[in-house]
Amino acid sequence: MDLIKEEIVDFEELKLPEILYKYRSWSNPDHRAIITDQIVYLAAPFDFEDPMDCKLQKDYSLLTQEDIYQRYFSDSAKFHPGWTIQQHRKFERDWQRKTIMSHTDLVKKKQNEHLVEFNDLYGVLSLTTNPTSKVMWIKYGENHSGFCIGFNPKVLCRLIGAGGEVVYYDELPITHPKDPILLEFNKQVYSKEKKWNFEEEYRTYRIFPKPASVSDRRVKIPISSFKEIIFGSKMPELHKVEIKSICHSLGMKIVFKNAQVVDNEIILN
């Protein structure tokens, strides 16, 4: 739990690697768009492969009766400033009996509504620090036949909205209903189970003002975002020629590298 950060870090002080990478497949038209149209897709949490990713539930069982009392007494004082102490206490007792936190079925319904709202309003771009991961090349780089594109994270995160490093846990952190909003959000966005730590993930995200459409989630990024393109060890030469031609026609100042598998390790040249 102590790995979760509550403080707001100024963007200029945010510690990001010099380059962050995204593994892609040139055979997939949606993946090609990252180069041809400079489009990245900000995924909704329900689209993630990891069923637990961005789906932490608030644990209302952590609230004490005193917590509930204080919540409704405070609300009463706020909305009925002219009432007596006795009237405030009656308001608190009445709502304490009615509260959603006393009914497990309603709690579950509220939790699901919260997740749906989070899914509709948030878009996440997953990136990695490691362009030489065998697992990542196999899983996300079309089994070494795709490519890995390197971005300037400062440009990317400034455009999209924010960013940071994913923290991996043996057990995912608990979200307390009394957590400050920033802490709750950081837990939700940057917490994953340790079995996913091979991804070495950083994320940048955007909060949409209303439920986001597919079109909303397709974000055009500036050419200055692009720094490297690494060709997979099995990528056809024709695909390499196509990518280089497109990049040159767009005036991208980009470094091209080739990935090779040597002694079961991936090296770049």
Image (cartoon, rainbow, N blue to C red):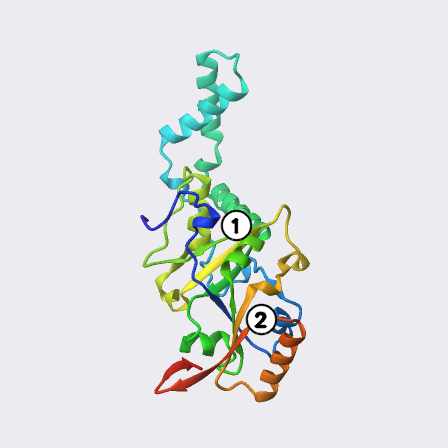
* Relative height, residue 258 to residue 14 (above, below): below
For mark 1, does the 10 Å Cα neighbourhood hold few (<14), some (14 to 19), or many (20 or more) residues? some
Measured in 3D between alpha carbons, the distance from the residue under mark 2 to the one under mark 1, in whole angstroms, is 41 Å
Q: Residue at x 58, y 71 (%)?
A: 253
Q: Nearer the viewer, residue 29 or 263?
A: 263
For mark 2, does the 10 Å Cα neighbourhood hold few (<14), some (14 to 19), or many (20 or more) residues? some
Splitting the image into 4 quarters, where does residue 63 fall? top left
Q: Amino acid at mark 1?
A: Leu
Q: Residue at x 43, y 49 (%)?
A: 13
* Relative height, residue 256 to residue 81 (above, below): below
Q: Residue 221: x percent and y percent? A: 61, 61
Q: Residue 189: x percent and y percent? A: 46, 53
Q: Residue at x 48, y 27 (%)?
A: 95
Residue 115 circle label: 1
Q: Residue at x 63, y 50 (%)?
A: 211
The secondary structure type at the circle numbered 2 is loop
Q: Residue 24: x percent and y percent? A: 54, 74
Q: Amino acid at mark 2?
A: Lys
Q: Residue 203: x percent and y percent? A: 48, 58
Q: Is residue 153 left or right of residue 247?
A: left
Q: Nearer the viewer, residue 40 or 208?
A: 40
Residue 253 circle label: 2
Splitting the image into 4 quarters, where does residue 200 fall? bottom left
Between marks 2 and 1 in the image, the one whose residue lies nearer the viewer: 2
Q: Nearer the viewer, residue 227 or 69?
A: 227
